[in-house]
Amino acid sequence: MNFDQIRINVRNMVPEVVHDLKELIRYPSIAFPGYPPDPVHRMARATVELLRRYGLSTAYAIDIPGGYPLVYGEFPAPPNSPTVLMYAHYDVQPAKKDGWEGDPFTPYKKAGRLYGRGAADDKSGIIMNAATIRCFEGRPPVGVKLVIEGEEETTSHLHGFIPEHPDFFQCDLCIVTDNGNLTVGDPVLTTTLRGEVSCRITVTTLDHPVHSGSFGGPTPDAFMALLRILSTLQDQKGNVALAGLASSQWEGSDFPEELFRDITCIHEGVDLIGSGPLSSRLWSKPSISVIGIDAPTIQEASNILIPKAAAAVSMRISPGADPDHEVQLLMDHLRKVAPWHVLVDVRRISASPGFICPTDGPGYILAKQAMERAFGKPVSEIGAGGSIPLLKILKRTVPKAEFILWGSEDLALSRIHGTNESVDIGEIERMILAQCLLLNFLSGKKE
Ligand SMILES: [Zn+2]
């Protein structure tokens, strides 16, 4: 199939693709504990049915012990052809009704975008992959494995399944369709992800609360001590102030400051913090924040000295950094800077690595070309702030595989995990086109 034929096939498919994506959005497939399991199972069945209807007749649901099913299907590779694994997930984030313009699970279209929970993250990925199969009329030019997970947004049981069943995941190129461009129509490939580490610090100074009038002055307050400790985590400019952390300069394109302010809705006049290019601060340097505090609320406030206070500290780490090393530096720092010999207990909560996607492999180079052709623009490289633990497991299980991180979820407007999540319909079409072209290129065709 040549470029023109692919383009026509994709264009003709759009109305049905949008209709079917709408149907997928109607399932509140929230896999979090405490939410009804039935819609998640129905969503898994709907995904199997969709894939079969789009030409993947081998699609079926695999039971994942302790978790929700994995939807899987494959086309064996034609002789001398590579195998591509395409990943998406069918579970979604919870969505409270308030803040949404309509019901989160009743899709609607507005100004070229389709709205609803999961419209972008990541039901757009499912439809992209299904449409890629359909474009080739159920006969893709390379081997294809489709992996649609049901627990990406919550504790994933797939992580344990992968190393025990490596055959399902063997491939030459792994495409993760759970990403997207910064803005609609401007193609990017995500090449790195930062990792994340976190710990909890508890400061104790007294056995029990005492009257601040009678004892305040010489008696250390645990909350004030904790604040002194936390205030050492950043320098005056807002850079992470821990010695010895891995950090690097971002080499790809920069993140335009105006767009960044727009997306994050930072209040006017509030400074951006840290130094160096915005892209480095977002994608290649560490950042740190306090994500929770245990101390009396204002409601509970009384004139006492607080005997015990605790905080959870989370740090994003440079993509190539060793998470065990970085979390240790953080914990050592917190203990070291404690004032007045107060009692400090620091415990590790988590340490997950980032990810670096090599950009010199043949698959990556072809993906860039396919995207350039589909969008009619040069492709730039970005990082991502969040981490995807699955990638590390896939990399360990299939060491030879290359990785492509792309998708239809634009950062500027999609509002994934937020209210009024949406996806741009033109972007889905361009991404299906790019993915079909990539499969064509991988089979040795020049267009
Ligand atoms: Zn996702």
Image (spheres, grey):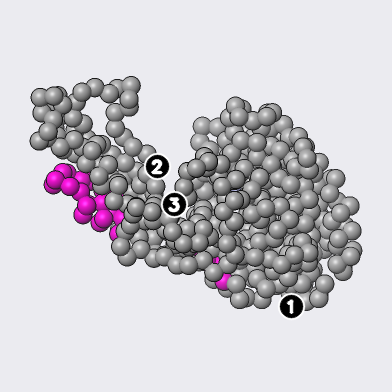
User: Residue at 21% of width from left, 37% of height from top?
Assistant: 222
Please state, as top left, top right, bottom left or bottom right, where the C terminus lies in the image.
bottom right
Left or right, residue 303 beside residue 128? left
Q: Is residue 236 visible?
A: yes
Q: Earlier in the sequence, mark 1 or mark 2?
A: 1
Residue 401 is inside the magenta segment: no
Q: Secondary structure at mark 2?
A: strand
* 167 versus 73 height, above or below: below
Residues 73 and 268: in front is 268
The residue indicated by pointer 3 is 273
Q: Position of residue 125 (x, y in %)?
A: 69, 51
Q: Position of residue 165 (x, y in %)?
A: 56, 60
Q: Picture quarter containing residue 30?
A: top right
Graded by Cα atoms within 10 Å as few (under 14), some (14 to 19) or many (20 or more), the crowding at tag 1 reads few
Graded by Cα atoms within 10 Å as few (under 14), some (14 to 19) or many (20 or more), the crowding at tag 3 reads few
Q: Position of residue 209 (x, y in %)?
A: 17, 27
The residue indicated by pointer 1 is 80
Q: Earlier in the sequence, mark 2 or mark 3?
A: 3
Q: CA distance from mark 2 to mark 3?
A: 17 Å
Q: CA distance from mark 1 to mark 2?
A: 51 Å
User: Residue at 46% of width from left, 62% of height from top?
Assistant: 276
Q: Position of residue 211 (x, y in %)?
A: 14, 24
Query: For the residue marked with disc 3, what is the amino acid?
Result: Ile
Q: Which range of residues does the magenta coloring cover?
A: 329-358
Q: Picture quarter containing residue 141?
A: bottom right
Query: For the residue marked with disc 2, what is the amino acid?
Result: Ile
Q: Picture quarter containing residue 435?
A: bottom right
